[in-house]
Amino acid sequence: MLRSIPLTKILVALVILFVFLLGVNYQSREELDYSKLEALEVEDGATKVSFKFLGGFDYSEDKKIPEPVIVLNGEVVQVAGFMLPVDFDSGEVNSFLLMNSRMACCFGVMPRENEFIYVEMPEGVTTKFMTDMPINVSGRLEIGEENLVGSLYTMDALSIKKADNF
C-alpha cells in the first residue's frame, strides 16, 4: 500500500501530526454501544458505514477496537464525508483525508485517530478536488496505524461520487 512518497505529501502529513501533538484533537465524545447495533446495510457490494460507527469508541485509551469494526478490515465499505486533499496537483487528487465534517482539522477540533480515513487512489488514477461538498467513497478498508497521517483507517478507493443524502 505504501508507495514512493513525494515531499509535499510528507510535509502535509507532518503538519497534521503536529496538530495531534498539540493536543487539540481530543474532545470528550459519547461512546457507541456496539452490542445494540443492527446489521449494517450493503449497497452495490459495499458495506455502508458511518463515522459514528468507525469513531464510536475511545481508541487512544486502551488501543482496543470493537469486534464489529474489526470485521470490516479488508472489506469493501462505503463512507460519506468531506475531502481534505493530502497529495494533489492542478485540481487532481492522489490521496486525501475523508473527514466527517468540513470543520474537522484546520478550523475546528482535530478528529481522533479513528474519526477520519486516509484514502489513496489507485496507482496512476486521480480524482477531482471536491471541497465543501459531501462525497461517498467506496473502497477496501484497512485497519491499523501503518499510514502516513496517523489515522487508524486507510482506504484504497474504488469509487468516489457526490453524496446525495448526507
Image: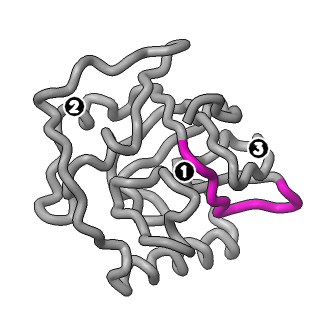
Q: Answer above or below: position of 34 versus 51.
A: above
Characterize the local packing of mark 2: few (<14), some (14-19) or many (20 or more) Cα atoms within 10 angstroms: some
Q: Residue at x 21, y 50 (%)?
A: 57
User: What range of the chain is rendered magenta?
Assistant: 81-91
Dot label at residue 107 = none
Q: Residue at x 72, y 54 (%)?
A: 131
Q: CA distance from mark 3 to mark 2?
A: 30 Å
Q: Is residue 136 left or right of residue 146?
A: right
**Residue 8 location (% of width, % of height):** 69, 74
Residue 140 among magenta residues = no
**Residue 152 location (% of width, % of height):** 35, 54
Dot label at residue 68 = 2
Q: Earlier in the sequence, mark 3 or mark 1?
A: 1
User: Picture quarter containing residue 33?
Assistant: top left
**Image quadrant containing the C terminus:** top right
Q: Give the residue type at disc 1.
A: Leu
**Residue 100 location (% of width, % of height):** 48, 51
Q: Give the residue type at disc 3.
A: Thr
Residue at which label 1 appears: 98
Q: Nearer the viewer, residue 33 or 5?
A: 33
